Image: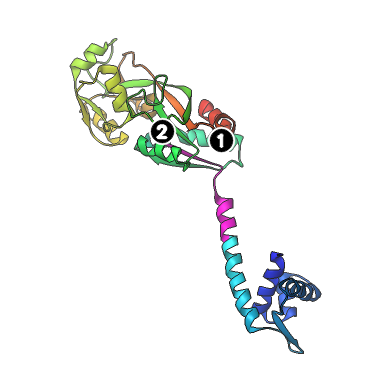
């Protein structure tokens, strides 16, 4: 069925006359009459009565066209939602979204202005991976290490996920300016003896990285979000192992200082469902992650 014929018949009910309908739709009156006749022929029944005053919907015609209008409105809404659906939905750890991905999105907009990307940040990586496994997102960006997904310390996800390490993420032990650990090369043993290590919370990548680096028995205090960790360090309430990208502005301004100690890097890891064209469909995102 031609939806334009339906829309014209519905408009005729609203505008009452062929001439008014033609003016509203920018068509010739003969086109309006022809579309209505064709629709009636296809349906095998008259939708309008005709007299010298014009065309008037029959009771059955009014009922049918009211239902048709509702159906067309539903189709229009579905089309609007379809056009608004992003090309890629990317889940990511909240700290990565806040500190790293803005530059990635800038790179994507520059290289692929028509590509629509929606970010879904979450502090809980289990929820991120569950959403990916269910097909609610197309990819997930997180911090990890090792050969397998989850080697940093979080539970292993479904084996149906594939991954690619985009690049290394440098880590830094940060303190307040003037801390006794500054100004010389420091060993991991000194970090352990110093104590006062702080982190976000036990499920955080930085927390897991600290335990992986210094051992599972290291004393760590949870203080909340990344901003709170930086505040505590700046106020000389402890030291923290954090990604350099998360503290670069504070290091440049002198608000925080980096301890001279070899901190193993983490990996910025892109995950997707195995079997989908991950590297093909996600290639623009992969490129932007490497360039930003």
Tell me if residue 274 comes above or below residue 79 in the rendering: above
Residue 282: quarter of image: top right
| Visual colour scheme | rainbow
**Residue beneath label 1, please?**
108
Q: Residues within 10 Å of mark 1 (few under 14, many from 20)?
A: many
The circle on residue 195 is none
| Number of marks in the rendered image | 2
Question: Per the image, is 87 magenta?
Answer: yes
Residue 250 makes an appearance in the image: yes
Whether residues under marks 1 and 2 lie with C-beta atoms below 8 angstroms apart, the answer is no
Percent position (x, y) of residue 72?
Answer: 61, 65
Whether residue 287 appears in magenta in the rendering, the answer is no
Quadrant position of residue 1: bottom right
> Foreground residue, 274 or 100?
274
- Going from N to C along the chain, the mark reached first, 1 or 2, is 2
Q: Give the percent coordinates (x, y) of residue 111.
A: 60, 34
Relative to the observer, which residue lies in front, 159 or 279?
159
* Residue plotted at (57% across, 30% down): 283
Residue with the mark numbered 2? 96
Q: Secondary structure at mark 2?
A: helix
Q: What is the distance, in whole Å, between disc 1 and disc 2 at their CAs?
A: 16 Å
From the top left corner, tell me how far across and down residue 197 is, in percent: 22, 24
Residue bounds of the magenta highlight: 77-92
Q: Is residue 162 left or right of residue 127?
A: right
Above or below residue 280? Residue 77 is below
Mark 2 is surrounded, within 10 Å at the Cα level, by few (under 14), some (14 to 19) or many (20 or more) other residues, namely: many
Q: Position of residue 25 (x, y in %)?
A: 71, 70
**Viewed as shown, does residue 266 lie left or right of 10?**
left
Q: Residue furthest bottom?
A: 52
Task: Please name whichever residue, 219 or 260, is drawn nearer the observer in this view of the structure.
Answer: 219
Q: Residue at x 59, y 31 (%)?
A: 280
């Amino acid at each position: 069925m031609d939806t334009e014929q339906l829309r014209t018949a519905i408009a005729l009910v609203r505008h009452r006359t062929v001439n008014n309908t033609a003016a509203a739709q920018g068509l010739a009156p003969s086109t309006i009459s022809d579309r209505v006749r064709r629709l009636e022929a296809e349906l095998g029944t008259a939708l309008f009565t005709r007299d010298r005053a014009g065309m008037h919907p029959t009771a059955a015609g009014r009922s049918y066209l009211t239902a048709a209008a509702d159906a067309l409105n539903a189709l229009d809404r579905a089309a609007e939602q379809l056009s608004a659906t992003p090309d890629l939905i990317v889940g990511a750890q909240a700290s990565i979204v806040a500190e790293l991905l803005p530059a990635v999105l800038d790179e994507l907009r520059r290289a692929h202005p028509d590509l629509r990307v929606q970010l879904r940040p979450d502090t809980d990586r289990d929820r991120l991976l569950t959403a990916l496994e269910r097909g609610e997102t197309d990819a997930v960006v997180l911090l990890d290490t090792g050969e397998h997904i989850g080697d940093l310390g979080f539970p292993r996800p479904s084996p149906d996920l594939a991954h690619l390490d985009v690049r290394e993420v440098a880590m830094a032990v940060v303190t307040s300016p003037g801390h006794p650990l500054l100004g010389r090369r420091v060993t991991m043993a000194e970090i352990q003896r110093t104590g006062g290590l702080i982190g976000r919370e036990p499920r955080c990548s930085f927390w897991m990285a600290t335990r992986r680096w210094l051992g599972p028995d290291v004393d760590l205090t949870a203080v909340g979000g990344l901003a709170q960790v930086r505040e505590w360090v700046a106020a000389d309430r402890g030291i923290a192992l954090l990604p350099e990208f998360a503290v670069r502005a504070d290091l440049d301004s002198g608000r925080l200082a980096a301890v001279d100690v070899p901190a193993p890097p983490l990996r910025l890891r892109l995950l997707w469902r195995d079997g989908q064209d991950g590297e093909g469909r996600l290639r623009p995102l992969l490129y932007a992650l490497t360039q930003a």
